[in-house]
Amino acid sequence: MVAPGSPHGLIVYETRLVSTLRYYINDGIPQANVLSNVEQHSFLGYYVAAAPGVDAGGTDRGSGHVPPESRQPLELRISRFAGDGLHEDIDLTNFAKGATQFTLAIEIETDCSDIAELPSPGASRHPLPASGARGNPPIPRCPSPRVRGEGARRADEGQLDRHIDIGFSRAPCFEGNRALFDIALERKESWHLCIDFAPWIDGQAMRPCHRCRSFEVSEVRQKIFLQEAAKIETRESGTLASVVEGTLEQARNDLAALRLYDLDSGIRAWTIAAGLPLYIALFGRDVLTASWQAGILGTEMMAGSLDALARLQGTRVDDWRDEQPGRMLHEAHTGPLSALDIDPRGRNYGSITTSGLYAFMVAELWHWCGDLEAVRPFIDPAMRALEWLDRERLQDGLYTYQTHSKDGVKHQAWKDSPDAIVYDDGSPVEPPIATCEEQGFVHIAKLHFAEVLWAMGRRDEAKKMFEETLALKQRFNEAFWMEDEGFYALALDANGRQVRSITSNPGHCIATAIANDEYVPRVVDRLFRDDLFSGWGVRTLSSQHPSYNPYSYHLGSIWPVEQGTFALGFWRYGLHDRVQQIARAQFEAAALFDFYRLPELFSGHPRDNDHPFPALYPNANSPQAWSASATFCLLQAMLGLYPYAPLNLLVIDPHLPDWLPEITIRGLRVGNAKVTIRFHGESWNVLEKEGTLHIVQQPLPWSLTATWPERVVDLLRSLVK
């Protein structure tokens, strides 16, 4: 139930259309018994009340207190199904010993609030499921009385018409904002009501796409993905290994459920929202990160995200949106404030990260699918994005950020909260700023994208891009290395001065291979010192820093998305013990959260006797796309799994720990091949294989990350032979 004043409700296109939804039995709210999701789109709540008019009787001597709602119960069961609106089944069953008569009142208030205007959701656990964008066609039902909720929004710039139609399968009487039903039930008799909440979004009708009690997944496109995506299994039970399996399965389902259907490029090419309940929108860097991190599942999210972002690539100079030609999107919101251009978030470009990651993911897609025709449509958008970086953001050999908008995002790198970038004395750093991880993102993007250009016969462009990566790597290590700390500076400020705060950011410099090889062991060891590594993961900021706050968004919390990327970096340099350490910490954390689901972020408290489990960041999204995807990175790093579909090649180098002695990947797709592999410790065996695929156990010589693309291909070709 959703009470007045709650931040929750039915949210469609980032617009809350229903703000209150409560059920009364004779003006009393029944007691909640068990409330839980069933599948990603469905919810079941059991409520009980003492059956009106039935004598509850006394308490039996010696039996303890037996509440009247248990002795003579009337059960209210609410089954809820989200998708193109909301369908609810209301079932009342009389389990009392006698007949009962009562009035069921359903209190409904409609709204047209932008999700950004709602109060903080805090720690509430049971909001209405968020409705997806347009999906299945409506399912025909018998005619029913309907009520239209008010919901128009107007502004000087224009107006919106967003409202909701509410249909009942039985005709109610109305008293204010309450629908009333007079009900009489004999013992064990039941009464059923269907309610459809059908949104109208700017003239387009949406209709709930679920039948009564359809708890199982019914969306055809979602079923196809879940059937085709790789599945991870373990034969262990009651151990951390079973937590790993549960975490990965939950992550797989979460990514499927976050699909933004109205942005589909095809049945097998789609993109996702960043997270629930706050980020029900397209975020450029989020979808790119989540898509490549979850590459083990398949290429559907990569292809769809690349296509969606190409369609929204910057084409003009619009300072209010921080848009420039070639720049890739930061976020695209659909709420009323954005749709009416009251804020610039309807199409905002305030991130430097997306433009580099776009080219990187084109290469990742090619590594997984091996089809140059599949990646060809994304080559020019990637080139334009990299050209924007070089034209607008390259200063003194490094990449900086700075907003041009009065309403813009101040910090436009990985850590984008307003207080994220601070000097070592805690004072704020003002843009323009060059952060260390952004240099790494551009480095790995150009390095891998040069390989794609080479394969496409664009040799001069590939050579030029490769030479640029070498120059960037040299400039980076000269500018950011802090010899006394054995670590990289967080950033360079507008005067080229090092921002010497100790943060998680240099972990990305390991993963992107921009760090000099001789510095890598020292950087990794520093990441695992107690002030950064809490026992549950690497903190965003050292606990010794004056700005440290375990509850802060970027000043001391722990982000699962970082831990997944870091694990791949540690594997890159053969640091398998560190891979296992960070993976174990994350999966043990997952075991403590509902559904084995890692949230967007959690607190940076140390893992000790005083803190046996981590606290939550108060407004953390759960599920969050890139927290879900990070779990697959952890697995990929432990398995040493590297696809190279252009040569029908899968390189593996498993180092499974004692707490995960065996794991099986079923239906792993590399190019046109599909394979099922069971891994044991450092060995493996193929259970099934379809198509041509060469599987080679080989530690990759990652020094090749600074090698001309043709030599990389020659080495991989030698493994096939």
Image: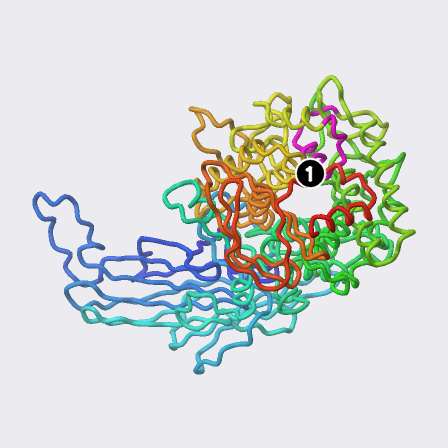
Quarter of the image with the N terminus in it = bottom left
Extreme bottom residue here?
143
Q: Where does the image place residue 547, in percent across and percent down from the top left?
A: 64, 25
Q: Which kind of residue does numbered mark 1 sit on?
A: Ala
In terms of depth relative to the viewer, which is nearer, 178 or 720?
Answer: 720
> Residue at 71% across / 61% down in the picture?
308
Q: Which quarter of the figure has residue 342?
A: bottom right
Q: Where does the image place residue 339, in percent across and percent down from the top left?
A: 70, 61
Q: Where does the image place residue 693, in percent across and percent down from the top left?
A: 63, 58
Element type at marker 1? helix
The part of the chain drawn in magenta is: 500-519
Extreme right residue here?
460
Name the residue carrying label 1.
511
Query: Is residue 654 visible in the rendered structure shown here?
Result: yes
Q: Is residue 8 magenta?
A: no
> Residue at 44% across / 54% down in the picture?
3
Q: Is residue 517 left or right of residue 11?
A: right
Disc 1 crowd rating (10 Å Cα; few below 14, some 14-19, many 20+) is many
